[in-house]
Image (spheres, helix red, strand yellow):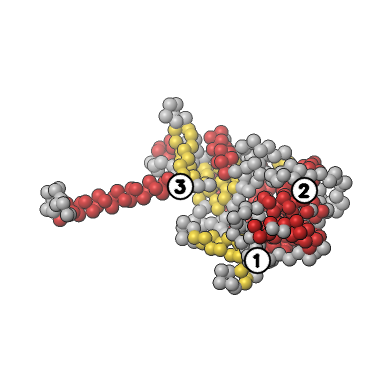
Amino acid sequence: MNDNRISDESIVPAKRTNNDVTETSAESVEERDSTKRNDVQSALPRTQCRNNSKSSRLYGVREAARKDSSLKFTALLHHVNTERLREAFFSLKKSAAVGVDEVTWQEYEQNVEANIEDLHGRIHRGAYRAKPSLRKRIPKPDGRERQLGIASLEDKIVQQAVLWVMQCIYEQDFVGFSYGFRPRRNQHDALDALSVAITSKKVNWILDADIEGFFDTIDHEWLIKFLEHRIGDRRILRLISKWLHAGVIEEDGQRLETTEGTPQGAVISPLLSNVYLHYVFDLWIEWWRKQCRHDVIVVRYADDFVIGFESHSEATACLEAIHTRFAKFGLKLHKDKTRLIEFGKYAIERRKRNGKGRPETFDFLGFTHICARTKKHGWFTIHRQSIAKRMRMKLKEIRRSCVNACIGRLVKQAGGSGVLCRDG
């Protein structure tokens, strides 16, 4: 996808090797032209896929997506049946906060069979209407606020059911270095993959990047266009559009329209965000690093990603290219959280030789990454220290210095004898 909302040709790789959930390094891709528009979906057995839900009848959808990366699915809504909606309801957290409908999980359960049948009927005859999200503002450590959107109970149910259907398709498409909000992948997998990549590849520079206000700035029109590469069922796309345009209700009761972004906290938002960055960033960076002459490694978790480079010139060129790429899709890097630093196997020696001191550190997924050497052999390794631990150590240091300063003042007031009176 590039300017004027037109797909790139021979730039966006569309076919990847199979995703291996045990793989830690980034997967390779085959470069080819963008997705073919298949309006006819091949006949598939109506069996479900193996996913995190108890359902197992989307297996045919998953296999079709795996075998043909250009297949466009035109019939998916029938998979959002009463059985899947029921499973979606029972998978929800019982104590979760209620949305604008003020319906709790326990209240809905009292007549769950009739409620699910009614919901299923409204979905399939087009009478289902998404309710606005209830906005909650959560303070962040840096003083800013995170805006969470709490969906109504029925919206959560339908989103969870649609999520399971779409996951069977997109889990065959997503690249190996994408770890956020995916089945059988977590933060520790991303951290381990990053450590292995930095220690095993020729990494001399690290680009630690964060997208500013990502969930709040996703372009709706671009998102739908990206989804249309794989989703040809207009009923599924209409459901997603309803959630995107449902609006939000502020805590004071004011209703606001939503023209961009997807609510943080919505069940479907993590998948939609991954789809957006899959086309905006993942496929593009795979193509970009194939043009490089030196090693380039990538690990992404949601809107937070790290790129390692062997060459400084390629690192600076990539950073400039990312700014340009993101601007085309309404995104931008956070200026205070995006840094290019010297880091890697030879950073300690190089900086010592140049009189620059120890290598800088970077934060990723709650951990500070530090260049270090093993005690026994002196081999290069990466020490990870939790950011919270660093904060506690810093606070202790500040407290200690404050205590010492107070003691110094008291000693001075006592005449410098070093002996304080009891009530002093």
Q: Nearer the viewer, residue 294 or 158?
A: 158
Picture residue at 28% right of the left edge, 52% below the top: 402
Q: How far is mark 2 from mark 1, CA to CA?
A: 46 Å
Does residue 146 lie above or below 287 as drawn? Answer: below
Does residue 310 lie above or below 424 as drawn? Answer: above
Residue 45, image x, y percentages: 85, 44
Q: State which mark lies toward you, 2 or 3.
A: 3
Q: In the drawing, does residue 147 fall left or right of residue 159?
A: left
Q: Nearer the viewer, residue 279 or 101?
A: 101
Q: Residue furthest front?
A: 110
Label 1: state its secondary structure. Answer: loop
Q: Residues within 10 Å of mark 3 (few under 14, many from 20)?
A: some
Q: Residues within 10 Å of mark 1 (few under 14, many from 20)?
A: some
**What residue sits right under mark 2 in the picture?**
33
- Please state which amino acid type lies under the numbered disc 3: Ile
- Please state which amino acid type lies under the numbered disc 2: Asp
Q: State which mark lies toward you, 3 or 1.
A: 1
Which is more N-terminal, label 1 or label 3?
Answer: 1
Which is more N-terminal, label 1 or label 2?
Answer: 2
Please tell me the numbered disc located at residue 387: 3
Label 3: state its secondary structure. Answer: helix
Q: In the drawing, does residue 394 fall left or right of residue 108?
A: left
Q: State which mark lies toward you, 2 or 1.
A: 1
The quarter of the picture where the N terminus appears is bottom right
Q: How far is mark 3 from mark 1, CA to CA?
A: 38 Å
Label 2: state its secondary structure. Answer: loop
